[in-house]
Image (spheres, rainbow, N blue to C red):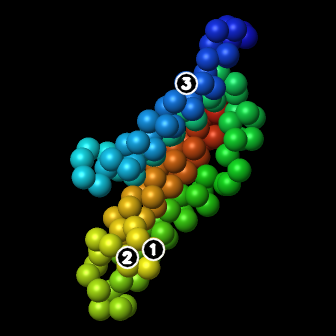
Amino acid sequence: MKPSFILTSTTKIIAVLVNIFAVMMFFKGHNDTGGGFIAGTISALSLIMLTMVYGKKYTKSLIKINPITLALSGVLLSYLTCLIPTFFDLPFMMHKLSYFGIGTPMIFDFGVYCVVVGTISQMIVILEEAN
């Protein structure tokens, strides 16, 4: 069964808006509700929506990196964000990195974002292959 014209024509626009909302939630998360986990979940929701409308091949063409590699790089990034400052006798999760101007919690949240998007993307691939 072919999806309706209205659904196929609006899904890409809705996916972009959902990802803009995910970016907003990511940056809002340090001081309020949000962060890497909820932003990753929202971004993965847009991938699920695109997969349901356009199919597995279209979604795989959007994801340029292997989802497992994305998830593992997110784990490594989060781990190193916490570990590296301890080698320089700095606090475990420094609030501010003087050289880069961004805090380690934001880098940690980006690692969590990568883990969530990678994991849910792999779930999408596995479930679509089983279907």
Residue 20, image x and y in percent? 49, 37
Task: Give the residue type at disc 3.
Answer: Ile
Report if the CB atoms under discs 1 and 2 are less than 8 Å apart.
Answer: yes
Secondary element at tag 2: loop
Secondary element at tag 3: helix
Q: Residues within 10 Å of mark 3 (few under 14, many from 20)?
A: some
Q: Residue at x 31, y 49 (%)?
A: 29
In the picture provided, is 28 more to the left or to the right than 112? left
- Indicate whether 129 appears above or below 31: above
Residue 44, image x and y in percent? 51, 39
In the picture provided, is 39 more to the left or to the right than 114? left
Q: Residues within 10 Å of mark 2 (few under 14, many from 20)?
A: few
Image quadrant occupied by the N terminus:
top right
Regarding residue 118, the answer to whether it shows in the image is yes
Mark number, residue 97? 2
Residue nearest the viewer, comparing 31 with 131: 31
Mark number, residue 14? 3
Residue nearest the viewer, comparing 68 with 35: 35
Task: Give the residue type at disc 2.
Answer: Leu
* Residue that label 1 marks: 100
In the picture provided, is 64 more to the left or to the right than 116? right
Residue nearest the viewer, comparing 16 with 128: 16
Mark 3 vs mark 1, foreground winner is: 1
Q: Earlier in the sequence, mark 3 or mark 2?
A: 3
Regarding residue 79, the answer to whether it shows in the image is no
Q: CA distance from mark 1 to mark 2?
A: 6 Å
